Amino acid sequence: MSQSHRRPRVRLVDVARAAGVSKTTVSDALNGAGRLPAATREHVQKVARSLGYRPNATARLLRAGHTRLLGVAAREYVETPWVYAELAYFSQLATATTQAALAHGYGVVLLPTYGPDDCWLDMPLDGVFVIDPVEGDPMVGDFLTAGVPVVADRRALAEVPVEAREAGRWVDFDYGAAVRQVLDHLEAAGAERIAVVAGATTACFHQQSVGAYHDWCAERGREPRIVAIPAPGVQHALEAVTELLTAPVPPDALFTLVELSPPLLLDTIRRLGRSVPGDLLLVCSTEDPAASYTDPPISTLGFLPGETARAAVELLVDCLDGRGGDDGRLFSADFRIRASSTVPARRAARQG
Amino acid sequence: MSQSHRRPRVRLVDVARAAGVSKTTVSDALNGAGRLPAATREHVQKVARSLGYRPNATARLLRAGHTRLLGVAAREYVETPWVYAELAYFSQLATATTQAALAHGYGVVLLPTYGPDDCWLDMPLDGVFVIDPVEGDPMVGDFLTAGVPVVADRRALAEVPVEAREAGRWVDFDYGAAVRQVLDHLEAAGAERIAVVAGATTACFHQQSVGAYHDWCAERGREPRIVAIPAPGVQHALEAVTELLTAPVPPDALFTLVELSPPLLLDTIRRLGRSVPGDLLLVCSTEDPAASYTDPPISTLGFLPGETARAAVELLVDCLDGRGGDDGRLFSADFRIRASSTVPARRAARQG
DNA sequence: TTGAAAGCGGTACCAG
DNA sequence: CTGGTACCGCTTTCAA
């Protein structure tokens, strides 16, 4: 058993008393402010150190009028809290945000996806990055009406009353275009039955991607083959893939929009008796670096977590510093074509 | 270009003035405190809402004397900032910590691994969870002397001056025992040349693991075969594996202590012309759930990110609430034996 | 050069 | 039932 009562922290006044000077002098001495004689300064510093003095962060923040803290929330699967750990995309986004924030002197708070309504408003945040808000997501509006700058996407901002939008910024992709790019590529490689695995959420990414897929199919009179999984996780994703590949008329191309370990996916496809790219062309939307190390390397559609995080932080910081920057930044998805979706020799020949 | 000047936030006094009452009344009305007539309460609430009033979090925290914020720092590779995104272990730990913290009404701040010395002390944290501190890590001592409760491991706490240890707690594993358990298992399965991939850090985990491996080898007069990678990342890890497997006398068992996508590892081993478990028994220390979905499923040594995170948060919260709880919690690693390290029929026969 | 005092924006204790 | 006021711990201005 350990000592239970925490000793009261030593405060500025304590140091002042011990050093026989005033609060002001201590503050100046420790912060390098004022014009004190070196002797006083050193004396105060020594006393402060010997007492183990540490300024109370909250107090100085209240004084400063800011907290230098940015919130990050991943909202894609609001109902299924925290499976995010397994999602390379969110991990990288959170990490990159932390990194970018640090570069600007900010810390990052991981926000919960659920919890007592508005509980996030009790956190001392200067700004918030809301990733993949779902349709009608209350978080964006809550922060904005509370006067806290937010970076989200354009759709989320559009849902907020105009008068509150002032401190709203966005980072976005043309998801539809990205998906079409992949579909066109697969079609050009000879695919006739492209199957898709998506997430069953109303986050912009999935909604627009699925919409684009349906449109694309409709334009060509093709029948969409899509499975939307209710929550992230290896199990769900693999089941979806299995369902698609064991259909009576199996697809000749697969495009996954949910995070799934690329080498595992490849392994699973092979166990189902199909070869890549021979029997099945494959493109994965993933940030897992393992994708380029498999055999064959897997084509990926990436959404630049590093760059978007940096942009989000910059947007937030500009807004906080009163610099009028852009309202948002539009990015283009990063489509990397590799062997998994490249026409094998014999099929290429067949296609002419 | 967007509006650059943020409008000043509306404060408690503003509401009070607008509603024609005092600060106290507003505070009570909004917090459900005091015994106000319903009419007053509603009136104040209406005014507050119409003004878009939100209490200043920093101010109420200063008043409350706590911040309800916990820090998390992953220190294993302090020099190589933020490759953590790719590490399932850290992602899950951070996520689980956030979840556990939320359950206790706390938020979580992701701490940077580097940065201006002591920069972490400027954050308004009630407590900190330092994961895998390296040898002589300053972070633990810094927080402790600042009076901020810390959860780390026993070694890190031992490095701190006794008088500062009061608010130090720990969560730990007997890494040596865990490693021996795996080595014994592999030996029993017939392995004679067990190779290990470890991380070149002084974090307790790697140091003790590598130490245990060397001891274990020495006890048996075996020659250790180990590669320590300088930083996490697919590239380094795969190179290490390749180096080990292409040695003149290749190992007959591989035990990886660094995070590496299990299916990718399997794939790589096969491309090097070895089969698992036929030619090579395989055990991975990883938290990647994909390990159990490969063919063959891969034996894993896990370190319970969920449970340790929960424990860490509890330890911190108990300490903060002045409840005298335990000084720490010792966990046992989770060794899951699967087909990748199970003796294939013919080898079992050969072994008798 | 140093120190007293006024806030930062709330909450909580009293007196009215 | 309500409002004045002290106070959380620090920074900053200003007077001595």
Image (cartoon, coloured by chain):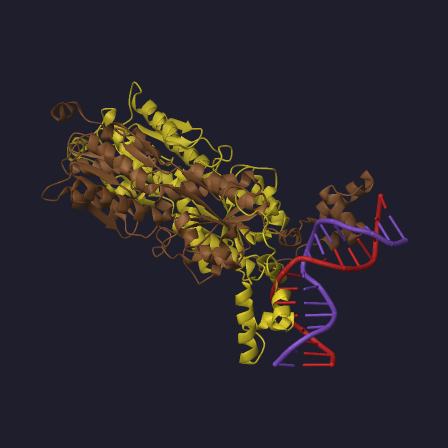
Chain colours: A yellow, B brown, C purple, D red
The structure residue drawn at horizontal position 19% and vertical position 36%, both measured from the top left corner, is B253
Relative to A251, residue B98 above or below: below
Quadrant in which the C terminus of chain B appears:
top left
Relative to A233, residue A56 above or below: below
Nearest to the observer: residue B228 or residue A128 = B228
Nearest to the observer: residue B98 or residue B255 = B255
Q: Quadrant of residue A175?
A: top left
**Horizontal side of residue B97 vs B106, given as left or right:** left
Nearest to the observer: residue A285 or residue B200 = B200
Q: Position of residue B89 (x, y in %)?
A: 37, 42
**From where the camera sits, is residue A117 visible?**
yes
Relative to A282, residue A225 above or below: above
**From where the camera sits, is residue A31 visible?**
no
Q: Position of residue A34 (x, y in %)?
A: 59, 76
Q: Position of residue A106 (x, y in %)?
A: 50, 57
Q: Position of residue B330 (x, y in %)?
A: 42, 39
Nearest to the observer: residue B21 or residue B120 = B120
The structure residue drawn at horizontal position 52% and vertical position 55%, both measured from the top left corner, is A316
Q: How many marks?
A: 0
Residue at the outermost left position: B248
Q: Quadrant of residue B194?
A: top left
Q: Quadrant of residue D6?
A: bottom right
Relative to A291, residue B22 above or below: below
**Horizontal side of residue B233 vs A173, given as left or right:** left
The structure residue drawn at horizontal position 29% and vertical position 26%, both measured from the top left corner, is A251
